C-alpha cells in the first residue's frame, strides 16, 4: 500500500487540533528518525501503520501493517500499547491462552437480574501465521488465505456445521438475506479504509454461518478471522462454550500468531491479548442517563457502546456492554470480569428503576441514598462535610423524601459520593434548604464557622459606593497582578442547573440573556450562547480565559452538565472587565476583574452591574441564608473577592503563610484555583 512519507504524516497529525490520538502522543521526532527507513520482513512500514490517523483525526490508535510490526517498530508500539491497555509499570506481557474448564462454568444467566438482556455475544479475532494484514497482503495471497480458512471451516461438524458465503460473486438473494440477518460486513469504515483494510475489495473475503445462525465467522474483514458466538437472552455460558469449542476445532488446522508479550496478534492494538470481547445488548435507560455513566461502567471493567457499536447512539435505552480488558489476562478471566461487571450494572439499573418510581418527569434519576452513602464512606469524615453529617438518623429520616420538584438528599450527595475529595453537597433547588434542614443546617454552621444554630444572615447592603473604606491595595504595582470580585445569583422561580429540565434551562437563559443585552454604559456588551457557537468566538473566549467547560467531575456528577451545552452562555462587556456565566453551577456567576490592585473600582462596577441586572429579575434570597446558591459554601453574600498576589518569599514559608491567612480570614489558592500549586509564588 502506497502512503505519504512518515515525516509528512507526522506533520499532518501533529498540526491537526482535532487529533487527540495516541499516535499523535507517541509519534515523536526520535521515533520518526529511527523508523522512517525501516521495513518489516513483509515490507511493511510505520507510515502504513499511522496513515489512518492522518486521514481520520478521531481515530485513537494506529493499525499494524503486518504481524511483525509490533516488534519491528517496538519503541513506538510499546508506548501506545502500554498506554491504551493501562499496563502496570509499562512492562507488556501476556499469559498462555486459557478458556477455563468449559464443563464446570458457574456464570448465572444475566437475565436473572431484571430480565434486561436482549442478547449475548462473544467474539475473538485471529491472525493466521505467515500472512500479512491489509497493507502488506497481495490480492493473490489474500485469496490463498481465504481458501485456507474456508477449508478449515468446511470441515467443522455438529453445531458448527454451516455454509460459507464468499463476497466475490455473491448472489443478490444471499446478499439480501445476510443484510436481513445483520451478518453482512461492508466497506464503509473510513478508519479501516485508510489502514488498508479494503484493498482489492471484495476479493478474498466472506462469511461463514452455521445452521442455527448462532455461530458466525468473518474472513478478512479487519482481522484474518473474526469468530462470533451469539444468541438471544443472557445465557453467557452457552455462548462462551460454543465459542471456545469452535476456536479449539479451528486451531487443529490453522496456526494462529501468538506472542508471549502481546498474546494473539491482531490488526488493531486494542484487540491484542485474548482478543476476546464478551458483550450483551441490555436495556439500561436509567443507568445510561446518569451523568457519569461511562465512568460507572469503567469502574466495573465494562465498556459501554451504542446499540450499533462504537461511536453510535443508543436506540430505546439499549446499550452494548462489554469487557474492557483484553491484554494481560486469560480468556476465562476476561469473560468472568465481564459477567461480574455487567451483573453489577444490571443490579444498579433495577435499583434505579425502583428508587425513582413516581419522580417528576425530567428530573435526573438517582441511585438510592443508601447506595451513595456506602460510596461516601471513602471520604474523610473530618474533612468532608457531606459525609460528616450524613448520619444513620439523617438517612432514615430523609431516604425517599423529595422536594416539590423532585430533588432528593441522594441528588445532593451524589457529587461527593463519586468524588471523595469534594466536601460539600449540591442542592437541586432553594426548597432543599427547608426540606432537608436537619442535614444542611449543621453542615452550613460547621462550614461557615457559625456558632449560633438559629443563625440569620444580615440584610444585604453593598455600602456607600462613593465612600468605600478601601481603595487601591497596591498603588506601586509591585505585588498585585490583578483583582477580581465575583458573586453567584439564582433567579427566583427556577430550579438549579443540577435538576433543571432542558426546556426550563432555555427559558432561564432567555430571561438572563435578555437582561444582559439591556445593560448600558461600561457594562454593555455581547452574549455568546454556547449552543452553535462559532469557532472564531470559541477561540477568542478561550484566549481571553472566559470560556467555561464541562470538565469538572464534581459538577458533572451533581448533574450540572445535563443537556450540555444547551441553555448556557457567556456575556462580557466591550472592555472585557465585566463577565457573566449563565447556567454554569449557579444561574449566574457575575464577575468583575481588572489588572492591578484597585479593589474599590472593581467592587463599585460589580455592584452597579448587579443592581442593573436585578431590575429585570428577582434573585432568590432568604432572611436566614442570604442569597441562595446551588452549593452551601456560597450562601450568604455569595461573594468572593480575590487578588493574584506575588509573594515568593512568604509562600516559601507555608506555616507563616497559613498563620497570616487564618489571622485575616483569608483563603490561599494556587495559581490555577483550589487544590493547585503556585510554582512562581503567585497566589490567589
Image: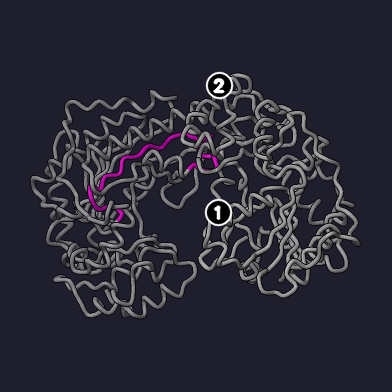
In the image, what residue occupies the spot 79% across and 56% down?
513
- Assess whether residue 265 is covered by the magenta stretch: no
In the image, what residue occupies the spot 63% across and 19% down?
397
Residue 551's disc number: 1
Is 352 or 683 nearer to us in this picture? 683
**Left or right of residue 658, residue 93 in this image:** left
Check disc 2 and report its element: helix, strand or loop.
Answer: helix
- Assess whether residue 272 is covered by the magenta stretch: yes
Q: Quadrant of residue 39?
A: bottom left
Q: Position of residue 118 (x, y in %)?
A: 41, 33
Q: CA distance from mark 1 to mark 2?
A: 33 Å
In the image, what residue occupies the spot 16% across and 40% down?
98
Residue 335's disc number: none
- In this view, 303 is above or below 602: above
Disc nearer the start of the sequence (1/2): 2
Residue named by callout 2? 392
- The magenta-colored residue range is 270-293
Q: Rate crowding at label 1 as few (under 14), some (14 to 19) or many (20 or more) other CA atoms within 10 Å.
A: few
Q: Position of residue 88 (x, y in %)?
A: 28, 51
**Left or right of residue 329, residue 629 in this image:** right
Check disc 1 and report its element: helix, strand or loop.
Answer: loop
Q: Quadrant of residue 161?
A: top left
How many dots with numbers? 2
Is 550 or 353 nearer to us in this picture? 550
**Left or right of residue 558, residue 304 in this image:** left
Amino acid at each position: 500500500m502506497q502512503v505519504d512519507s512518515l515525516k509528512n504524516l507526522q506533520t499532518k497529525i501533529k498540526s491537526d487540533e482535532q487529533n487527540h490520538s495516541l499516535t499523535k502522543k507517541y509519534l515523536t521526532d526520535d521515533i520518526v528518525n529511527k523508523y522512517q527507513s525501516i521495513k518489516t520482513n513483509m515490507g511493511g512500514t510505520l507510515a502504513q501503520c499511522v496513515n489512518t490517523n492522518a486521514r481520520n483525526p478521531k481515530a485513537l490508535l494506529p493499525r499494524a501493517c503486518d504481524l511483525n510490526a509490533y516488534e519491528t517498530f517496538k519503541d513506538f508500539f510499546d508506548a501506545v500499547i502500554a498506554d491504551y491497555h493501562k499496563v502496570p509499570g509499562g512492562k507488556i506481557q501476556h499469559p498462555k491462552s486459557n478458556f477455563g474448564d468449559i464443563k464446570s462454568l458457574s456464570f448465572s444467566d444475566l437475565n436473572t437480574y431484571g430480565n434486561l438482556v436482549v442478547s449475548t455475544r462473544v467474539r475473538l479475532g485471529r491472525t493466521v501465521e505467515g500472512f500479512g494484514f491489509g497493507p502488506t497482503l497481495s490480492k493473490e495471497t489474500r485469496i490463498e488465505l481465504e481458501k485456507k480458512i474456508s477449508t478449515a471451516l468446511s470441515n467443522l461438524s455438529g453445531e458448527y456445521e454451516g455454509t460459507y458465503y464468499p463476497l466475490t460473486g455473491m448472489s443478490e438473494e444471499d446478499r439480501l438475506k445476510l443484510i436481513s440477518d445483520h451478518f453482512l460486513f461492508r466497506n464503509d469504515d473510513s478508519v479501516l479504509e485508510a489502514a488498508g483494510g479494503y484493498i482489492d475489495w471484495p476479493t478474498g473475503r466472506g462469511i461463514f454461518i452455521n445452521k442455527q445462525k448462532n455461530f458466525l465467522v468473518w474472513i478478512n474483514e479487519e482481522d484474518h478471522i473474526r469468530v462470533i458466538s451469539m444468541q438471544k437472552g443472557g445465557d453467557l455460558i452457552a455462548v462462551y462454550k460454543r465459542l471456545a469449542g469452535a476456536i479449539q476445532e479451528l486451531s487443529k488446522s490453522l496456526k494462529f500468531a501468538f506472542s508471549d508479550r502481546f498474546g494473539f496478534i491482531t490488526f488493531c492494538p486494542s484487540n491484542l491479548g485474548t482478543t476476546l470481547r464478551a458483550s450483551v445488548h441490555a436495556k439500561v435507560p436509567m443507568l445510561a442517563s446518569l451523568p457519569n455513566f461511562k465512568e460507572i461502567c469503567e469502574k466495573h471493567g465494562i465498556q459501554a457502546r451504542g446499540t450499533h457499536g462504537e461511536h453510535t447512539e443508543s436506540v430505546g435505552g439499549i446499550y452494548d456492554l462489554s469487557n474492557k480488558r483484553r491484554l494481560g489476562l486469560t480468556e476465562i478471566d476476561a469473560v468472568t470480569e465481564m459477567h461480574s461487571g455487567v451483573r453489577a450494572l444490571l443490579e444498579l439499573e433495577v435499583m434505579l428503576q425502583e428508587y425513582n418510581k413516581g419522580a417528576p418527569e425530567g428530573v435526573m434519576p438517582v441511585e438510592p441514598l443508601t447506595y451513595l452513602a456506602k460510596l461516601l464512606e471513602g471520604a474523610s469524615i473530618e474533612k468532608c462535610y457531606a459525609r460528616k453529617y450524613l448520619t444513620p438518623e439523617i438517612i432514615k429520616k430523609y431516604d425517599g423524601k423529595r422536594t416539590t420538584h423532585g430533588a432528593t438528599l441522594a441528588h445532593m450527595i451524589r457529587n461527593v459520593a463519586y468524588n471523595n475529595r469534594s466536601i460539600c453537597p449540591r442542592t437541586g433547588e432553594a426548597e432543599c434548604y427547608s426540606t432537608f434542614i436537619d442535614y444542611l443546617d449543621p453542615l452550613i454552621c460547621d462550614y461557615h464557622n457559625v456558632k449560633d444554630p438559629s443563625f440569620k444572615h444580615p440584610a444585604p447592603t453593598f455600602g456607600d459606593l462613593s465612600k468605600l473604606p478601601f481603595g487601591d491595595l497596591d498603588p506601586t504595582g509591585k505585588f498585585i497582578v490583578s483583582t477580581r470580585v465575583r458573586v453567584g445569583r439564582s433567579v427566583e422561580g427556577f430550579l438549579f442547573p443540577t435538576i433543571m429540565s432542558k426546556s426550563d434551562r432555555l427559558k432561564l437563559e432567555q430571561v438572563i440573556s435578555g437582561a444582559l443585552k439591556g445593560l448600558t454604559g461600561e457594562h454593555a456588551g455581547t452574549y455568546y450562547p454556547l449552543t452553535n457557537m462559532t469557532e472564531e468566538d470559541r477561540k477568542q473566549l478561550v484566549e481571553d480565559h472566559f470560556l467555561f467547560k464541562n470538565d469538572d467531575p464534581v459538577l458533572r456528577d451533581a448533574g450540572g452538565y445535563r443537556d450540555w451545552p444547551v441553555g448556557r452562555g457567556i456575556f462580557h462587556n466591550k472592555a472585557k472587565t465585566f463577565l457573566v456565566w449563565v447556567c454554569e453551577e449557579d444561574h449566574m456567576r457575575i464577575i468583575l476583574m481588572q489588572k492591578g490592585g484597585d479593589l474599590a473600582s472593581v467592587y463599585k462596577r460589580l455592584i452597579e452591574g448587579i443592581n442593573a441586572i436585578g431590575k429585570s429579575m428577582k434573585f432568590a434570597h432568604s432572611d436566614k441564608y442570604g442569597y441562595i446558591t446551588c452549593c452551601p459554601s456560597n450562601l450568604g453574600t455569595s461573594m468572593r473577592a480575590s487578588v493574584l498576589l506575588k509573594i515568593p518569599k512568604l509562600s516559601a514559608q507555608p506555616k507563616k503563610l497559613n498563620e497570616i491567612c487564618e489571622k485575616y480570614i483569608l483563603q490561599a489558592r494556587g495559581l490555577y484555583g483550589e487544590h493547585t500549586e503556585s510554582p512562581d509564588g503567585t497566589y490567589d
